[in-house]
Image (tube, rainbow, N blue to C red):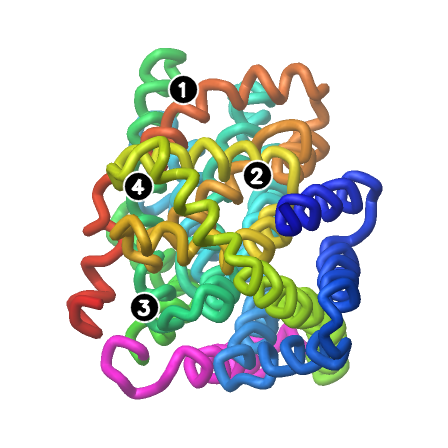
């Protein structure tokens, strides 16, 4: 009953507009007061959560992504994608999708993906005869891969809150990310055949070589991170620091389009943004301690067991629940609230927490492409200069490949676990 009241009160505070960190902090403090526990426990649990070598990966990955964006690699990424898939049916749509996967390995952010690639590709698709709604929808759907492929702060945050290996979480996002992109490319091909969308001539050897030279630096960043972890050269946090050095090298030495002053401004920006993220993580840790003390995961697991003990059914319930939450909450906030509560629940049903973590991150970010929150939709809609109704109608078909990808990742655990198990051994 106490837990139900706390969760209900927190939902009320969130609906009233209180930031998620303050809502969790207020509920945690109230609980400690009512339970007659020293209020200093709130500070102790919060500081312990962020006093971690692993947590350093969050600002480092964030800074690496900002540096890569500052290097203005977007045009090079698009040129590389065009050389690879531009000759497929619906060439520019295929370029849009593949560019999202490459860009995800640079920024790890869905919103950055939509803003950076969409500002170039949506107008280009409109000029080439693609409907504005279709251009905005394919950009929104493909950008959802952003937090899945490493580097990914979302995966690091889940690892910290669910107490799983950060290395396993980062590697677990590789094949799901590729799966999401392949499913969308097949769907784009079907749509292109149906609507007779154009395609580009196949790139010549010289054009492909030139595109590769320009795009390789962007592709190398996730390669460095994944390769370093695979070979055991460095930990995920050390990989994040190396990614920052690589971004500085590209921006200040190779391309020389990032000045010392710009780099300093980025450091300040990332420092302030990271402080906000880490503050939320810290408060979420205290809140999760309260939830664990009240045995919320055990209660939830018992309630689900009353419905079914089949892991497949439990996974279906989790998908529906996460989709519902993602439609009304920003993915990052929802992840921080739910990860420490749901991870122990799925483990009790024999579901691997790393596998579930990939699904949780993916399903919640799909909420960014659905109303009423739909941040990704609104960015693409604004770039395409269309109304909300047209944007929503254009998005509806794209929920088919997104739904297919969710089911594949949910019910084929090997997609998420194959690479982590090969590198670290079965959990």
Residue that label 4 marks: 410
Residue at position x 60%, y 33% in the image: 327
Give yes or no for contact between labels 2 and 3 (Cβ–Cβ under 8 Å): no
Q: CA distance from mark 4 to mark 3?
A: 17 Å
Q: CA distance from mark 1 to mark 2?
A: 32 Å
Residue closest to the eye, 197 or 374:
374
Whole-percent x, y for residue 341 in the image: 50, 55
Q: Nearer the viewer, mark 4 or mark 1?
A: 4
192 with respect to 119 (left or right)? left
**SS category of the residue bearing label 3:** helix
Q: CA distance from mark 2 to mark 3?
A: 24 Å
**SS category of the residue bearing label 1:** loop
Residue 197: numbered disc: 1
* Image: 2 above or below 169: above
Q: Which residues lie in the magenta part? A: 229-258
Residue 168: numbered disc: 3
Residue closest to the eye, 12 or 98:
12
Whole-percent x, y for residue 207 in the image: 33, 52
Give yes or no for contact between labels 4 and 1 (Cβ–Cβ under 8 Å): no
Q: Nearer the viewer, mark 1 or mark 2?
A: 2
Residue that label 2 marks: 326
Q: Is residue 212 magenta?
A: no
Q: CA distance from mark 2 to mark 4?
A: 17 Å
Q: Is residue 250 magenta?
A: yes
Whole-percent x, y for residue 126 in the image: 58, 25
86 with respect to 264 (left or right)? left
**SS category of the residue bearing label 2:** helix
């Amino acid at each position: 009953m106490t837990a139900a009241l706390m969760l209900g009160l927190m939902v009320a505070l969130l609906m009233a507009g209180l930031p998620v960190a303050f809502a969790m902090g207020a509920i945690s403090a109230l609980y400690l007061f009512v339970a007659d526990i020293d209020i200093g426990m709130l500070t102790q649990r919060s500081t312990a959560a962020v006093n971690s070598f692993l947590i350093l990966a969050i600002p480092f990955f964030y800074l690496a992504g900002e540096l890569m964006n500052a290097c203005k690699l977007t045009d090079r990424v698009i040129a590389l994608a065009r050389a690879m898939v531009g000759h497929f049916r619906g060439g520019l749509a295929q370029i849009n999708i593949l560019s999202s996967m490459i860009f995800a390995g640079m920024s790890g952010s869905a919103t950055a993906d939509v803003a950076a690639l969409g500002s170039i590709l949506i107008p280009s698709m409109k000029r080439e005869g693609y409907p504005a709604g279709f251009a905005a929808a394919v950009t929104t759907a493909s950008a959802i891969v952003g937090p899945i492929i490493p580097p990914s702060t979302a995966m690091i945050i889940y690892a910290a809150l669910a107490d799983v290996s950060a290395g396993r979480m980062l590697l677990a996002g590789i094949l799901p990310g590729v799966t999401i992109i392949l499913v969308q490319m097949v769907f784009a091909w079907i749509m292109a055949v149906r609507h007779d969308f154009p395609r580009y001539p196949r790139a010549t050897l010289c054009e492909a070589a030139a595109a590769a030279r320009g795009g390789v630096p962007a592709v190398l960043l996730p390669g460095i991170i994944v390769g370093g972890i695979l070979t055991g050269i460095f930990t995920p946090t050390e990989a994040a620091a190396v990614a920052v050095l690589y971004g500085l090298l590209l921006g200040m030495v190779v391309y020389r389009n990032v000045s010392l002053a710009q780099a300093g401004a980025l450091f300040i920006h990332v420092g302030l943004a990271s402080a906000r993220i880490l503050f939320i993580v810290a408060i979420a840790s205290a809140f999760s301690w309260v939830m664990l003390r009240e045995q919320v995961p055990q209660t939830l697991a018992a309630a689900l067991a009353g419905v079914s003990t089949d892991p497949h059914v439990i996974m279906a319930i989790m998908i529906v629940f996460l989709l519902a939450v993602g439609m009304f909450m920003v993915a990052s906030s929802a992840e921080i609230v739910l990860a420490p509560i749901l991870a122990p629940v799925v483990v009790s049903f024999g579901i691997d927490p790393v596998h579930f973590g990939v699904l949780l991150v993916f399903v919640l970010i799909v909420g960014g492409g659905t109303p009423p929150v739909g941040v990704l939709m609104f960015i693409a809609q604004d770039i395409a200069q269309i109304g909300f109704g047209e944007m929503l109608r254009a998005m509806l078909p794209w929920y088919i490949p997104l739904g297919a990808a969710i089911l594949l990742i949910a019910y084929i655990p090997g997609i998420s676990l194959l690479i982590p198990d090969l590198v670290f051994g079965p959990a």
